[in-house]
Amino acid sequence: MSISTASKALNNTGRMGDDTRERVKRIAAEIGFRPNALAKGLLSNRTFTIGLLTNDTYGRFTLPVMAGITEALVDHGVSVFLCTIEDDPALGKVHVDAMLDKHVDGIIASGKRIDRRLPVDLSNLPVPVVYAFTEGAPDSVTFCADDFQGAALAVEWLQGLGRHRIAHVTGPESFVSVRERARAYRELAGDALPVMYGTWSEAWGHEAVAQLWSTAGAKPDGIFCGNDQIARAVVDALRERSVRVPEDVSVVGFDNWEIVAAQTRPPLTTVDMNLKALGREAGLTVLALAEGRAVEPGIRTLPCELVVRQSCGGDPDL
Amino acid sequence: MSISTASKALNNTGRMGDDTRERVKRIAAEIGFRPNALAKGLLSNRTFTIGLLTNDTYGRFTLPVMAGITEALVDHGVSVFLCTIEDDPALGKVHVDAMLDKHVDGIIASGKRIDRRLPVDLSNLPVPVVYAFTEGAPDSVTFCADDFQGAALAVEWLQGLGRHRIAHVTGPESFVSVRERARAYRELAGDALPVMYGTWSEAWGHEAVAQLWSTAGAKPDGIFCGNDQIARAVVDALRERSVRVPEDVSVVGFDNWEIVAAQTRPPLTTVDMNLKALGREAGLTVLALAEGRAVEPGIRTLPCELVVRQSCGGDPDL
DNA sequence: TCAAGATGAGAAAAGCTTTTCTCAAATATT
DNA sequence: AATATTTGAGAAAAGCTTTTCTCATCTTGA
């Protein structure tokens, strides 16, 4: 039996008797034959391997993205190199070079905010690059969450529960995400209360509540927070002041960071950016590009969704 | 110029004039020649690629391990496939098969607790396997943190600060880690107070404080917690009762989960399991095995260290 | 000057698949 | 029965390196 005949049998190509084909397959299965992906790749210029580059050390954003990528690509036999490159350009170059040496079919760049570039030059690479949750090069494909729509979801949810004096406690104004979310807040909630910019820390959540409750006049009945950590702190701070959540004040977070949102008392209703879906899309896109299919460049915005827990009241089953 | 001469020039092998060698190298650098790792691997049976298998979806434990692996191996030109296999044996098999197809040089199995196996059969694989922070097969190399020593560190630190009525609020007794830490606690703190087993949740931290402070008699002046989440909740609960931390009670956590430990008010003094070092060791070991070097099987225990913040008092600069 | 040794560079094989091409045998057609 | 067509299976090349072998040239010593 020649090698070429066996190859054709296993790949269902070439002409040969059905009996021969079956016999080859059976024996291949028996001896546990597995084609050498390297030899295959050498020939086809496909390694069924992609690289995921990120500067998100905690994996807060990258892990869900990664999960989505893997989920989408595992069926295609694609494996993922994960490279965490702090914010070190040298390290970034080392990792990109390693990926190129290994002939990845494509690279996905990911990060922890959508208005910052990774500290590596990904232009003029011999493989396609797509960006997910990080700023992409011009004319590239970039995926990100729809901050405006997500924030709108949160504010509308509060309003739907009858909350009309809504505050917005959020992160630094330097973040595009923060400005987008604030824009949605302003458009929907009017400007009864000024947006409260601060840091992404629990400390800021506490301080914001202190500020809100120290000023005279009507207190908010709803607080839309820029992320779950702030929301958590806000909830804690309210409890310390004996303000009841959700009876007196409804609180919405952002990120659906399980580990924070679910542990808060009461658990947070929060906006989920669907990072996993984002990863799926990014994975499928880089695969398409690797296969030579044309993909229109541009920024693709994916919708957020609201995850209802108990920090707003209302029926969680709605 | 023949291909073989070029190859020899670049690899510093073979016999040839220094001028020729230099000329080849210069031109190679000029045209940006990079040898095809696939062809190389096909020949040498080394792909400079390893697989990291984990069931730790949040990356709580795996990401530090991964960082250590990468740090140790990037200099050797090794890249890492990360595969998160929930707890799904089928998915696990798919990923392991994908790794084998791609001829990884070795596999590192990691997890979220040291007394559970990954839901995949890693025996009789054609590549070396080492285990890090998950239960390994008999006669394999397994790395884990020294829970006893880490716990001792915590208790001794409290005692060194003059705390002698120390409570231990921890996770479920079913965890080996929990039992080891409790054993250290008992040996060092005596059994003035019974170990308080519970869940790994903040809720349990609150409840434990409630229990401790509702019983009559002397209250603890030190609390050693089984992880940072519990510690955080304990600190919060104490504050709610107007017990001052660290003035009245010192609290120590376990894990040094930055995101929790640093955000707690006051920030937690806590035990760090050195997972990154663990990853480094695991990476170097799997590399050694891949290169055919002999490595003695067995369980390697790496020491923990105490990270001093403010939840115990004392001088953080000690 | 001739033989022996040293030196530099190229040819070929190996590593594993896939694909294209070729060829012999078997079947179909006239 | 002889030619044309189809069919099955093997040979060879390509993909990129590395390594071993061979060979021609140059140097050295006698």
Image (spheres, coloured by chain):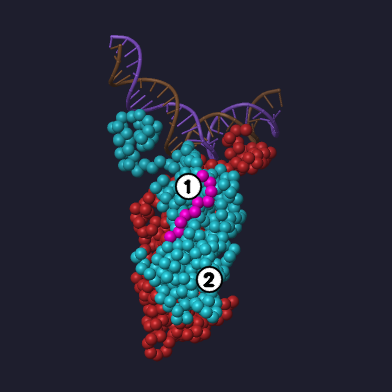
Chain colours: A cyan, B red, C brown, D purple
**Badge number at residue A285:** 1
Mark 1 falls on what kind of element?
helix
What's under tag 1, amino acid-wise? Thr
Q: Quadrant of residue A245?
A: bottom left
According to the picture, the residue beneath numbered tag 2 turns out to be: A192
Which residue occupies the foreground of this view, A109 or B152? A109
Tell me where the magenta segment starts and ends, as one range: A296-305
Relative placement, left or right, of B49 versus A116 is left
Which residue occupies the foreground of this view, B175 or A299? A299
Asked if residue B61 shows in the view, the reply is no
- Location of the C terminus of chain A by quadrant is bottom left
Which residue occupies the foreground of this view, B180 or A179? A179
Disc 2 chain ID? A
Q: Main secondary structure of the magenta part?
A: strand
- Between marks 1 and 2, how big is the CA–CA gap? 43 Å
- Quick one: label 1, few (<14), some, or many (20+) residues within 10 Å? many
What's under tag 2, amino acid-wise? Ala
Q: Quadrant of residue A272?
A: bottom left
Seen at 55% across and 79% down, the residue is: A215
Residue A256 vertical placement versus B171 (above, below): above
Q: Is residue B24 magenta?
A: no
Query: Residue pushed farthest bottom?
Result: B217
Residue B266 vertical placement versus A95 (above, below): below
Seen at 38% across and 79% down, the residue is: B207
